Amino acid sequence: MYYNDKTVLFLDGKFIKAADAKTDLFGQTLHYGYGVFEGIRAYKTVNGVKLFKAHEHFDRLRNSAALVGIPFQYSAEELTQIAYQILERNNLTNAYIRPLVFCSPNMSLNGPKEVSLMIAAWEWGKYFSTQALRVCVSAIQRPNPKSTKIEAKTCGHYVNSILATMEAKERGFDEGLMLDGNGFVAEAPGANFFFEKNGVLYTPPLGNILPGITRNTILEIAKELDMPVEEKLFRPEELFEADNAFFCGTAAELVPIESIEGQPFAKSWKNSMGLIVQEAYKCIVLDKSYSYVIV
């Protein structure tokens, strides 16, 4: 699914066949989840193949490493150039790029002396297989922000995300919506969350969520289109009176939510603010004008 015998990736300064890539089974990242990563999409735009907000993603990768004490020397510009070479060497246009910073062999709980960098890419369509998601309120909470660096995109955090998604699917839903330790809505296992009510978009504030690059893009779109947006804390009970809602993220892009805990929303997606934002987002990633989008 992710590579074949011709796929090339970048590993520690070299472009090599993915099938020939090796790692040490005693690596600290493998045993303790002590590593950082990113997910970036490339699109075939009207101006050629482009990585969407590459520098923002690679700046976040560098910041994630710094937050958790992983030494990492590559600049955002260097990483961007490597990513474009990966796309070219694999003849990819619409693709997903995965940079991973992982640590050297170390069975102690001390910081690493050496780290490795891997950048791979593959074709990847929609993250969710359905057009609109049936979502439940997850029993799995987001980690306490005082227990970890919640704003860092670290490998180990995603055990939490996997548990939440597995729980949702075991209950017959497509995805879960996670709360923070105080019972406020936080985010999906791999995406940020917005809901619409009376002509206003609402989203949880930073603090208990990953500062999503797609989330920030939506805030920029809303400002450009004069859409009112409020970042606030809210409990899941408020969502049962919402007009509509959606998830957003690099992999997910923008995906509508059909219902929460089996209760559908009052407004259809085709009449929602979310659809307007979704159309504008599609235009941005493809380097097209979205001036035709009127609120």
Image (cartoon, grey):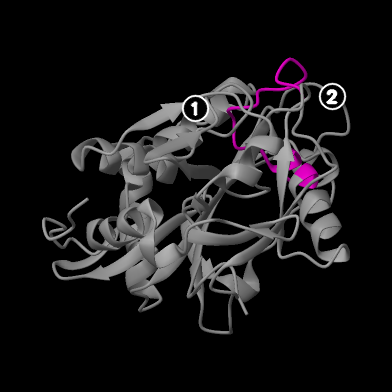
Q: Is residue 107 visible?
A: yes
Secondary structure at badge 1 equals helix
Principal secondary structure, stretch drawn in magenta: loop
Secondary structure at badge 2 equals loop
Location of residue 55 (image quadrant) = top left
Mark whose residue sits in front, 2 or 1: 1
With respect to residue 186, does 168 lie above or below?
Answer: below
**Which span is picked out in magenta?**
144-160
> Which residue ends up furthest to the top in the rendered image?
146
With respect to residue 203, does 66 lie above or below?
Answer: above
Q: Which of the image's four quarters has the N terminus?
A: bottom right
Queried whether the magenta region covers residue 157, the answer comes back as: yes
| Residue positioned 38% across, 46% down in the render | 79
With respect to residue 56, does 82 lie above or below?
Answer: below
Judged left or right of residue 208, residue 88 is left
Q: Is residue 104 visible?
A: no
Read off the residue under disc 1.
63
Queried whether the magenta region covers residue 71, the answer comes back as: no
Q: Position of residue 267 (x, y in %)?
A: 48, 58
| Residue positioned 68% across, 30% down in the render | 235
Q: Position of residue 207 (x, y in %)?
A: 59, 21
User: Closer to the N terminus: mark 2 or mark 1?
Assistant: 1
Judged left or right of residue 36, residue 99 is left
Q: Position of residue 188 (x, y in %)?
A: 65, 47
Q: Residues within 10 Å of mark 2 (few under 14, many from 20)?
A: few
The disc labelled 1 sits on which kind of residue?
Answer: Asn
Read off the residue under disc 2.
109
Location of residue 87 (image quadrant) = bottom left
Report the number of discs. 2
The disc labelled 2 sits on which kind of residue?
Answer: Leu
Q: Residues within 10 Å of mark 1 (few under 14, many from 20)?
A: some
